[in-house]
Image (tube, rainbow, N blue to C red):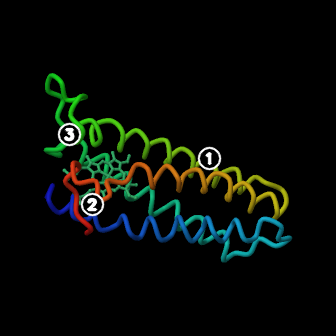
Amino acid sequence: MINFLISTHSGIRWLVLLFITWATINALMKRKSTTYAERDRRLNLLAMTFFHLQAVIGISIYFFSPKVQFFEGWIKQTMYRFYGLEHALLMVIVFVLLTVGHSKSKKADTPTKKHRVISLFYTIALCLIFIAIPWPFRTSLGSSWF
Ligand code: HEM
């Protein structure tokens, strides 16, 4: 079961990256637009939902992963510090940013403001995701492409 969750978590990252990037570019391009279509709302919601799903799986893995271990001196070891602290904490911050950004966009009273709120919150979130992902070229983290 844990291996299945880890593989799912690893694979879904691409969907999360695709949708958050798509929603961010869409919002940035429409920053001056005077219309906020149903299509825009659905894209922003879908991007946030994929992230939420990924985070729920991530939080479940956190308690069973062999890469999360709190032995003496774990904080000084790159891989254990990354998964036990950096990856999880940054992703929780991204969770909050996307949720708050999406909620504020719903309350904004003009289409332009809706796009601007999404572009601000989703851009910051995307930057943090890029920092917090265990890219396979960071060999000390022991992750793979899928
Ligand atoms: C609160 C949110 C999250 C938590 C608590 C979390 C936790 C974890 C943990 C514990 C692992 C190590 C799994 C193992 O034993 O191999 C892991 C791996 C990973 N996580 Fe997350 N994660 C979260 C969100 C995310 C998000 C949003 C993404 C991508 C957009 C992501 C991408 C990955 C990737 C690519 C791996 C490496 C999988 C591999 O070994 O190939 N995580 N995560």
Residue 93, horizontal then vertical, whole percent: 49, 41
Where residue 139 sits, quadrant-wise, is: bottom left
For this view, does 34 lie left or right of residue 95?
right
Which residue type carries mark 3?
A: Val
Helix, strand or loop at label 2? It is loop
For this view, does 79 lie left or right of residue 18?
left
C-alpha distance separating marks 3 and 1:
28 Å
The residue wearing badge 2 is 136
Where residue 92 sits, quadrant-wise, is: top left
Helix, strand or loop at label 1? It is helix
Discs 3/1, front: 3
Q: Is mark 2 within 8 Å of ligand 1?
A: yes
Q: Are marks 2 and 1 in contact (CB under 8 Å)?
A: no
In which quadrant of the rendered image does the C terminus lie?
bottom left
The residue wearing badge 1 is 100
Discs 3/2, front: 2
The residue wearing badge 3 is 68
Which residue type carries mark 2?
A: Pro
Residue 66, horizontal then vertical, whole percent: 13, 44
For this view, does 119 lie left or right of residue 13?
right
C-alpha distance separating marks 2 and 1:
30 Å
